[in-house]
Each structure stands twice: as structure tokens, then as C-alpha cells.
Image: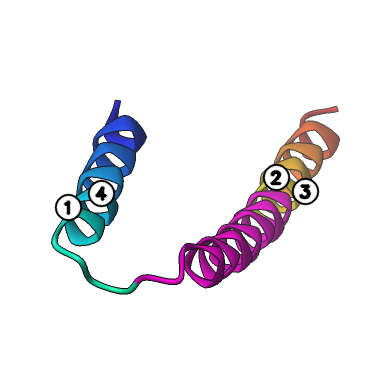
């Protein structure tokens, strides 16, 4: 829902600016957004992988000590 609201705000802003006659280069805007999304997803994936590795290592050491 949060992303839907953000996309709606973005769309309203783009169409509002276009109707007011402002010159907007949509291709450049969407290219920058795509690059930002790629960087964000990549960063999130790396952080998730590091967190999963830490949790797995902690679980492994606990199981090893228990047996």
C-alpha cells in the first residue's frame, strides 16, 4: 500500500506538471528512478545476505555447543 501511495503521488505530480506546461524529460526521470531502484534492491539484497549469514553462523555455533 505504501508503494502504491508513492507511485500515485509521483504520477499526480508528473501529470500535474505536464498539464501546467512544464517541460519534463520523462525518459531521463524514469531512467534515474530505474537506476535508483536497482541500487536500492542491490543494497537490500547484500544487507539481507549478510544478516542471514550472521544468523546462520550464530545458530550453527549454538547447535554445535548443545551437542
Residue 46 image position (x, y, % from top left): 70, 59
Q: Nearer the viewer, mark 3 or mark 4?
A: 4
Q: Residues within 10 Å of mark 2 (few under 14, many from 20)?
A: few
* In the image, residue 39 above or below residue 10: below
Q: Name which of mark 3 and mark 2 comes first in the sequence.
A: 2
Q: Residue at x 32, y 31 (%)?
A: 4
Residue with the mark numbered 1: 16
Residue with the mark numbered 3: 57
Q: Residue at x 60, y 66 (%)?
A: 31
Left or right of 49, for residue 33? left
Is the residue under label 4 in contact with that under label 2 (CB below 8 Å)? no
Quadrant of the image containing the N terminus: top left
Q: Nearer the viewer, mark 1 or mark 3?
A: 1
Q: Name which of mark 2 and mark 1 comes first in the sequence.
A: 1
Residue with the mark numbered 4: 15
Secondary structure under tag 4 reads helix
| Most common secondary structure along the magenta stretch | helix
Amino acid at each position: 500500500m505504501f508503494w502504491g501511495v508513492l507511485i500515485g503521488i509521483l504520477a499526480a505530480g508528473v501529470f500535474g506538471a505536464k498539464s501546467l506546461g512544464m517541460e519534463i524529460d520523462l525518459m531521463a526521470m524514469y531512467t534515474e528512478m530505474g537506476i535508483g531502484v536497482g541500487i536500492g534492491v542491490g543494497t537490500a539484497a547484500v544487507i539481507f545476505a549478510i544478516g542471514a549469514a550472521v544468523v546462520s553462523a550464530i545458530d550453527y555455533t549454538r547447535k554445535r555447543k548443545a551437542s
